[in-house]
Amino acid sequence: MFALDLIIHEDAERSRRATLAEVYVNLRKSGQFIVLATCDCELLGKVLRDGKIVFEIKEEFYKGHRVTVEEAIELCKQSTIVNMVGQCIVERAVKEGLIHPEAILKINGVPHAQIVKM
């Protein structure tokens, strides 16, 4: 395999794995707003620390249904407020044009982003 073919194959494999990846979604309505919290499954219950930042990925907030990343992205498109954490969901949101790469906050290397639609 040539180097370029290998890179293309690796990108396709990464995309396939991201497609099969699952995330937790917790959807709720607050007044006129639809609020979505979503995180990569392996992060649920973890505490991220980075300097003075302590970010808890609490089950009460993030745990709802376990869905594919594609399903979560569709929910993001329908929600007015979105809070997301994790490599899979944030990368996919960037790829879909929902998040600008400069709007991502990395906490101990883990991406976190928010969407607020006015």
Image (cartoon, rainbow, N blue to C red):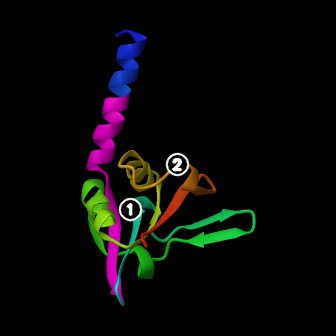
State the image coordinates of residue 58 (x, y, percent, origin top left).
48, 76
Q: Earlier in the sequence, mark 2 or mark 1?
A: 1
Bounds of the magenta segment: 11-30
State the image coordinates of residue 46 (x, y, percent, origin top left).
53, 67
What residue is disc 1 on? 41
Task: Say above or below: 80 vs 40.
Answer: below
Residue drawn at point x = 28 percent, y = 68 percent: 78
Q: Is residue 26 magenta?
A: yes
Q: Secondary structure at mark 1?
A: helix
Q: Which mark is residue 101?
A: 2
Q: Secondary structure at mark 2?
A: helix
Quick check: 69 left or right of 91?
A: left
State the image coordinates of residue 1 (x, y, percent, origin top left).
34, 10
State the image coordinates of residue 26 (x, y, percent, origin top left).
34, 75
The residue at the far bottom in this view is: 31
Which of 114 and 112 lies nearest the eye of the viewer?
A: 114
Q: Which mark is residue 29?
A: none
Residue drawn at point x = 43 percent, y = 73 percent: 118
Residue drawn at point x = 33 percent, y = 85 percent: 29
The residue at the far front in this view is: 118
Q: CA distance from mark 2 to mark 1?
A: 22 Å
